[in-house]
Image (tube, rainbow, N blue to C red):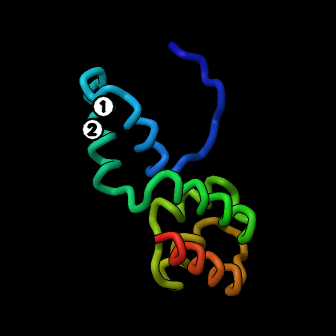
């Protein structure tokens, strides 16, 4: 079994990019199912997802995990965004939520 070298939160778009580098003929069943799922549900390309993650972390003071959650869901309204951030158990100001939506809209 391979040793874990680095632990990092990545969006489904980034995971899709990683799996695209693999030969489909050499993928096991789980990898193929995962790739099929990612192909259906990734909403943006990996480059855009990485850029968005950095913007959300820097401009909205999110953790990497929180930024990835937002990227995977890509909420489109303030109410939808609030429903996800509510579970984080921290106060997020309305202006920060608006900034998050602006970043999402600019990258989708």
- Please state the horizontal and vertical placement of residue 82, each as a whole percent of the image: 56, 79
101 and 46: which one is in front? 46
Viewer-side residue, 67 vs 20: 20
Badges 2 and 1: C-beta atoms under 8 Å apart?
Answer: yes
- The residue furthest top is 1
Residue 74's place in the image compared with 19, above or below, is: below
For image coordinates 45% across by 65% down, the residue present is 73
- Other residues around mark 2 within 10 Å, as few (<14) / some (14–19) / many (≥20): few
Q: Residues within 10 Å of mark 1 (few under 14, many from 20)?
A: few
Q: Which mark is residue 101?
A: none
Q: Position of residue 19 (x, y in %)?
A: 40, 35
Residue 64 located left or right of residue 75: right
Report x, y in % for residue 79: 50, 84
> What residue do we see at 37% from left, 37% from top?
20
Q: CA distance from mark 2 to mark 1?
A: 5 Å
Quarter of the image where one finds residue 62: bottom right
* SS type, badge 2: helix
Q: Residue at x 27, y 34 (%)?
A: 32
Q: Is residue 72 left or right of residue 86?
A: left
- Pointer 1 residue: 30
Which label is found at residue 33? 2
Looking at the image, is 74 positioned above or below residue 79?
A: above
Q: Is residue 6 left or right of residue 41?
A: right
66 with respect to 48 (left or right): right
Image location of residue 41, percent across then percent down: 33, 57
Q: What element does badge 1 sit on? A: helix
Rendering quarter of residue 68: bottom right
Q: Is residue 31 above or below residue 89?
A: above
Residue at 62 percent of width and 75 percent of height: 100
């Amino acid at each position: 079994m391979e040793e874990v070298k680095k632990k990092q939160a990545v969006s489904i778009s980034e995971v899709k990019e990683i799996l695209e580098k693999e030969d489909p003929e050499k993928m096991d069943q789980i990898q193929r199912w995962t790739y099929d799922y990612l192909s259906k549900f990734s909403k943006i390309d990996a480059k855009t997802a990485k850029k968005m993650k950095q913007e959300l972390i820097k401009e909205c003071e999110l953790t990497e995990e929180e930024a990835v959650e937002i990227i995977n869901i890509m909420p489109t309204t303030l109410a939808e965004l609030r429903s996800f951030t509510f579970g984080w158990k921290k106060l997020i100001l309305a202006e920060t939520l608006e900034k998050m939506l602006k970043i999402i809209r600019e990258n989708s």
